[in-house]
Each structure stands twice: as C-alpha cells, then as structure tokens.
Amino acid sequence: KNEVEQSPQNLTAQEGEFITINCSYSVGISALHWLQQHPGGGIVSLFMLSSGKKKHGRLIATINIQEKHSSLHITASHPRDSAVYICAVLNTGNQFYFGTGTSLTVIP
Amino acid sequence: EPEVTQTPSHQVTQMGQEVILRCVPISNHLYFYWYRQILGQKVEFLVSFYNNEISEKSEIFDDQFSVERPDGSNFTLKIRSTKLEDSAMYFCASSENSGLVDTQYFGPGTRLTVL
C-alpha cells in the first residue's frame, strides 16, 4: 500500500507552460516535503510545509490538510526544470513516506 | 554555501562484507537522516538521528544496520553483512531543526553495489 500517491507519473511540457504536480496522502501528517531529484540522482529540498502555501521563485507549493492533498506548481517552465519531483510526508509518528515521483520533461 | 558531503561516491562490495558509508552533515545541523533508493524505485526512509541517538527508524533498518556519529562531524551508516538487495543509492541528509519544521539538505549519495 502506498501512503503517498503522486500524479501524473510522467509529464512532458513545452517551455513556458504552467505545470501542476499533485500529491495525495493517506496518513495523518506533521509536515510535507517537496523534493527535486536531478537526472544525476542528487536530491534538493524545495519546500517543507504543514499548512497553506509557500512560494519560491517560479515554484509554488500548496497543501490542503483536510483533503490530504498538496500541489506543486511551476510557472513559466524551463528545460532546466526537467527532473523528478518527489512528495514526501512526515507522519504523526515521525516516519517519512515518499511518493514514487513525477518525472517532468520540459521541451524547448 | 554549506553542503552535505558523502564518501565514497560509489562502493562495490562482496555479499556478506561489512560496509561503512560516510557523511559529513552541515556543521550547525543537529538532525541527521539516512535514506536509500533502489534503482528505479522510490526513496525510502531508513533512520533519523538526534542528540547521539536514533530518533526514528523504519522497518528496513534492522539489526544489520547501525548509525554512529563518531567524532562530532561524521555521520556513518554501517551495514554489517551486506546482501544483494542492499544494492542501492544511499542518501544522507541533515537539518538544523527536526523534519517537522525545517527543510533537509541532502548529500549527493553513495551508490552501493553488492556482488
């Protein structure tokens, strides 16, 4: 059973498009993290949120605790945004659960 | 900008051998984590460590695994008797505060290959 589900699994977009990646989870959480994994394997933390919305540059992350859902938005997408985006949750028992990731390809 | 470092970048070992994966977290961070990612699969949490003891561990983190902060800068993951299924990328991460309130900084990973 997957505690964290992401959609879509794969996404191809044209440069400049607005992108949304979704994450749904089934456990009670204390926090939700959005991570970016580069083609070489390195992982970068993008956001940590427990409520509301956060923005960093062209990235926006939102979370709806009642609906157990979070979204990651990328505005004005660029080929350098191509990566795997991973949603991870910290449940109330302090265990981390990871989604399988969304593979994003942005075409020039 | 400070970063988490990991050594070696790639470790090849024979089944049954002990391996130690090393991590140097960011210097003022207090919380440390190990994760693994089997090729083609999702990242999995192994263990979190704070104040010189394990805070949380997953079902994966059985008696074959141990962690240590031997000298105040390094954070190590030891696998006592490696199995083929331990082949994976192992990521270390650190954060200033707990994962409840703070982002984590990840190292570049160590690719472990068990033959």
Image: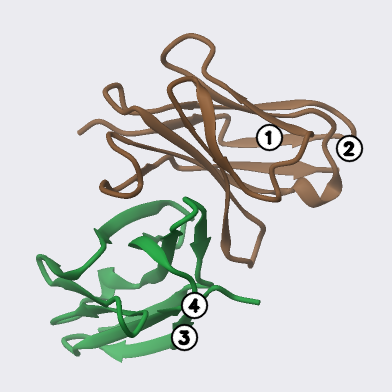
Chain colours: A green, B brown
Callout 4–callout 3 Cβ contact below 8 Å: no
Q: Are marks 3 and 1 in contact (CB under 8 Å)?
A: no
Q: Which sits earlier in the primary sequence, circle 4 or circle 3?
A: 3
Amino acid type, residue under disc 3 in the picture: Asn
Cα distance in 3D space between marks 4 and 3: 22 Å
Label 2 and label 4: CA atoms lie apart by: 37 Å
Report if the CB atoms under discs 2 and 1 are less than 8 Å apart: no
Residue A26's mark? 4
Q: Which mark is residue B15?
A: 2
Provide the secondary structure element on which disc 1 rests. strand
Identity, as a three-letter code, of the amino acid under mark 4: Ser
The 10 Å Cα crowd at callout 2, few under 14, some 14 to 19, many 20 or more, is some
Q: Mark 3 or mark 1, which is nearer to you?
A: 3
Mark 2 vs mark 1, CA separation in Å: 12 Å
Question: What residue would you read off at disc 3?
Answer: A10
Residue A61 located left or right of residue B115? left
SS assignment at label 4: loop
